[in-house]
Image: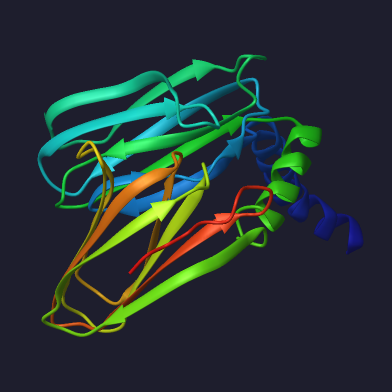
Amino acid sequence: MMTSLTKRLSPIFLIIALATICANADDWDKTVSIQGRGTRQTCVFPIVGERWRIRYAPKGRGNVKIELMDENGVVVSTPISYKNVEMPVSASGKSSPALRSAALRIVGDTNGWSCAFEQYVNEAAGWEIFRWRKNYAAGKNLKKYAMWTGDAGDEVEFPLTVDAKRWRVLFETFESGKVKVELLDGTGKCHLLNYHLDKGTSDGWVFNSGEYILKVTSVGSSWAVSAEVEDGFNASKLVK
């Protein structure tokens, strides 16, 4: 009876074993995953894998440009640049000892998109990413220096003078509606452009100090926006 049962279960164990082996052989870590409508810059993340890939999926037809930046916001390469793309696109590359941390600048269509940065890692490198994700990506080393709130129907601008070289804008809508947030520097360059159609949160990173204009246009939803700065950088002076 026991022998018969073992024989019947053996193929099942074999399938599980093979699946486990295949899973262990494919060690792609989705280090950064982001969704948006417009322009976003991600946080700085570690590059510890042997190679990497970027996957971008639009929700409608539009242009896209994705830049790989170093930890200071300097563009290193432009892996993806297409016009009128409506299907998922990807790019890949080999990691370099000269670039051990990076960020993404995604200039996508306002219809919406999703983007992921993945890297092929071994067990030790995977543990390093786990520690980073637990502490850094969770925002544990960020301090909030200013916060503004508003109501549906707002069309407002806030001037910001920021001394820190690396900081984040965190944005939240509380009801479904059409809410647009835009961050421009003194040259007119857009560092954050995002549309909210449903309630939720989004964030965008900035890698330069200087003077900025934060614009919020809201139809149908109250909102809140805050500026946060990394520990280890100079405090920000924000002027309403």
**Residue appearing at x 26%, y 36% in the figure:** 88
Q: Residue extending furthest right?
A: 2
Figure quadrant of residue 217: bottom left
**Residue appearing at x 44%, y 39% in the figure:** 208
Left/right of residue 29 with respect to residue 183 in the rendered view: right
- Residue 63 to residue 139: above or below: above
Residue 164 coordinates in the image, percent (x, y): 53, 47
Left/right of residue 120 with respect to residue 20 in the rendered view: left
Q: Name the residue nearer the viewer: 2 or 230.
A: 230
Residue 28 coordinates in the image, percent (x, y): 59, 35
**Residue appearing at x 32%, y 38% in the figure:** 106
Left/right of residue 52 with respect to residue 221 in the rendered view: right
- Residue 11 to residue 138: above or below: above
Name the image quarter holding the C terminus.
bottom left
Number of callouts: 0
Name the image quarter holding the N terminus.
bottom right
Figure quadrant of residue 4: bottom right
**Residue appearing at x 22%, y 41% in the figure:** 108
Q: Name the residue nearer the viewer: 178 or 208.
A: 208
Residue 70 coordinates in the image, percent (x, y): 52, 27
Figure quadrant of residue 159: bottom left
- Residue 66 to residue 11: above or below: above
* Model colouring: rainbow
